[in-house]
Image (tube, rainbow, N blue to C red):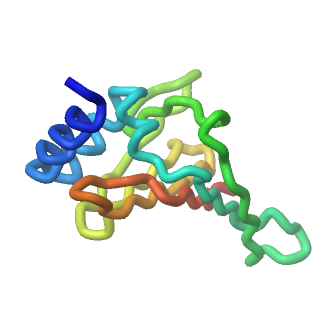
Amino acid sequence: MSESVADSKQNVELAKCSFSDFVKKFSEDSVFQKKHIRFPLEIAFDGTDYEDADSVSISFMKESEWKFMTLKDSIIEGIKYIHEVDTTSYTVTQWGEDTGIFVVYNFDKSDKTWVLNKIEDHSN
């Protein structure tokens, strides 16, 4: 099966699944994950300017810089990461228990599937 036919079939299957199901697959399959990210990916960091705590710094990540990540509750190097999926706004919020880590992953619907289009890092 050609790649475009396979992608089309996968998009039809995704159109039938919920956002929560999509996030689960996004967290388990590195190839699927990379295909569902809009590159260059916008990353916004809050408060990087110590003189202006309300400042936002924006950068863009190239596809070649992306590393597979999971959006499931987990413990990594002794830190408990918790994830909350919002099926209304198509976001996944990640925070590290007792760490100050607070990151929002924003998805939008594109061609009958979801695509990660922005990461907002509100960590302190």
Relative vertical location of residue 32 with respect to residue 93 in this rendering, above or below: above
- Please, which residue is most extreme toward the right here? 51
- Please, which residue is most extreme toward the front here? 2
Relative vertical location of residue 9 with respect to residue 50 in this rendering, above or below: above
Task: Quadrant for residue 64, please give it.
Answer: top right
Task: Judge left or right: residue 110 versus residue 55.
Answer: left
Residue at 64% across, 55% down? 123
- Residue 99, percent from left and from top: 61, 44
Task: Judge left or right: residue 62 versus residue 25.
Answer: right
Residue at 49% across, 33% down? 69
Task: Quadrant for residue 23, please give it.
Answer: top left
Of the pair 103 and 3, the residue shown nearer to us: 3
Of the pair 51 and 121, the residue shown nearer to us: 121
Of the pair 8 and 97, the residue shown nearer to us: 8
Relative vertical location of residue 80 with respect to residue 107 in this rendering, above or below: above
- Residue 80, percent from left and from top: 48, 33
Of the pair 31 and 70, the residue shown nearer to us: 31
Relative vertical location of residue 113 with respect to residue 69 in this rendering, above or below: below
Q: Quadrant of the N terminus?
A: top left
Tag count: 0
Task: Judge left or right: residue 1 versus residue 122.
Answer: left
- Residue 75, percent from left and from top: 46, 26
Residue at 44% across, 60% down? 106
- Residue 29, percent from left and from top: 35, 27
Residue at 63% across, 57% down? 43
Q: Quadrant of the C terminus?
A: bottom right
